[in-house]
Amino acid sequence: MDNQRVPGNPTEAPRRKQRRGFASMSPDKQREIASKGGKAAHLKGTAHQWSSDEARAAGRKGGQISRGGRGRIAEPAIA
């Protein structure tokens, strides 16, 4: 057998994933780039501007939705 790398080969040491794109940047650099994008959207007129009523409705809706999964209140067991 020649010495080629085979995915899933148990004898091959696991390689550490390297961060790419935004994940490889410092948090400050990420914030700087994201800020530029937000400013550009506002200048272009395509950014969404929340009204008080929209924000209130979104907050109400988010508060009503069950989280599900972990942290959910356990239902009483029927004996």
Image: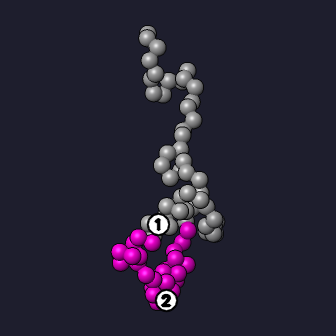
| Disc assigned to residue 49 | none
Q: Are marks 2 and 1 in contact (CB under 8 Å)?
A: no
* Bounds of the magenta segment: 39-67
Residue most extreme to the bottom: 53
- Which type of secondary structure does the marked residue at label 2 adopt? helix
Q: Residue at x 50, y 67 (%)?
A: 35
How many numbered discs sit on the rendered protein? 2
Q: Position of residue 17 (x, y in %)?
A: 54, 38
Towards the viewer: 43 or 14? 43
Please state which amino acid type lies under the numbered disc 2: Ser
- Image location (x, y in percent) of residue 56: 51, 86
Residue 30: percent from the left, percent from the top? 54, 58
Q: To which residue does mark 2 refer?
A: 52
Q: Which of the numbered marks, if any, corresponds to residue 36?
A: 1
* Viewer-closest of 51 and 29: 29
Label 1 secondary element: helix
